[in-house]
Image (tube, rainbow, N blue to C red):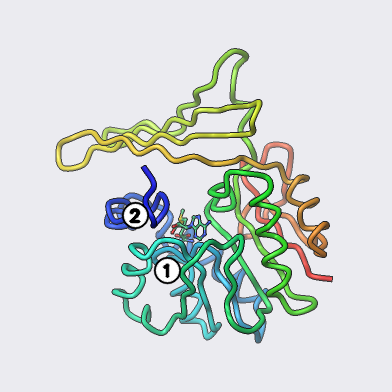
Amino acid sequence: MPDEDGYFGEAVAARYDQSSAEMFDPSVVEPAVDFLAELAAEGRALELGIGTGRVALPLAARGVPVHGIELSKAMVARLRAKPGGDEIGVTIGDFSTATADGTFSLAYLVFNTIGNLTTQEAQAACFRNVARQLEPGGCFAIEVGVPGLRRLPPDETFHVFDASATHWGIDEYDVANQGLVSHHFSLVGGRWQLLSMPFRYVWPSELDLMAELAGMTLRERWSDWRRAPFTSESQKHISVWERR
Ligand SMILES: C[S@@+](CC[C@H](N)C(=O)[O-])C[C@H]1O[C@@H](n2cnc3c(N)ncnc32)[C@H](O)[C@@H]1O
């Protein structure tokens, strides 16, 4: 259940880097950091939902000044404990409303985190909040899965997305409300634990409209950080909108 840290409280934060280990692999992180460093150019970068610094720390190590907005103090404590973590400014708050000082050439929101905002209103507010903090010509980059409805047979609401000896991941769809609960069953210290987290899945075209309403225009869309083309088969996208 969520507490004042949201769904990423102490228990989740303590295991985050380990339970998301494949996302920390250099083969995953480096292309993202290359892409984002290029977009930031000579400017500052704002990470929404900075977490434990998976992307922010290597991006800062490239010389890009990074600031974060983050709801969970427990996640930020893990960032602070890492080398370089103390040098990254973090605003504690909700990234759909909270602001940081100054303006940025780049804002980014990775690893499906736009879906942690579970209403259309909050997701649209996030785009407006980002637009207010970007310099003219600044960019907003999002990494998020394409809603997986094509994998859902008629009359089914559950989709198993991972099955291993230590983890089962099952997405539960609420199609009428564009809602999704990700259920994670994990074997921890010999006991199975369940963590369920709500998301709002969102279509690329819907994100484009939110951007448009916030004064931003789609600049590029790819299926990965190495700029593979986005196609009908793509399971995720990297989209970049530019502030007009
Ligand atoms: C999946 S983690 C991603 C962390 C980091 N960006 C990464 O790629 O490893 C999502 C993070 O976003 C934070 N978060 C979720 N909703 C938020 C909100 N509305 N405002 C601020 N932070 C939020 C969570 O606390 C968590 O640290």
Q: Secondary structure at mark 2?
A: loop
Q: Nearer the viewer, residue 239 or 223?
A: 239
Q: Residue at x 33, y 49 (%)?
A: 19
Tag 1: residue type?
Answer: Gly
Relative horizontal placement of residue 113, taking residue 137 as reference (left or right): left
Question: Residue 215: image x %, image y %?
Answer: 82, 64
Question: Residue 241: image x %, image y %?
Answer: 75, 63
Q: Residue at x 67, y 53 (%)?
A: 228
Q: Residues within 10 Å of mark 2 (few under 14, many from 20)?
A: some
Q: Nearer the viewer, residue 17 or 197?
A: 197
Rendered image quadrant of residue 77: bottom left
Does the Cβ of the disc 1 residue fall within 8 Å of ligand 1? yes
Looking at the image, is 213 positioned above or below residue 36? above
Tag 2: residue type?
Answer: Gly
Q: Residues within 10 Å of mark 1 (few under 14, many from 20)?
A: many
- Quadrant where the C terminus sits is bottom right
Question: Residue 66: image x %, image y %?
Answer: 53, 78
From the image, tell me which residue sits under label 1. 53
From the image, tell me which residue sits under label 2. 9
Q: Nearer the viewer, mark 1 or mark 2?
A: 2
Rendered image quadrant of residue 71: bottom left
Instruction: Count all numbered tags in the image, as a single digit.
Output: 2
Relative horizontal placement of residue 67, taking residue 12 as reference (left or right): right
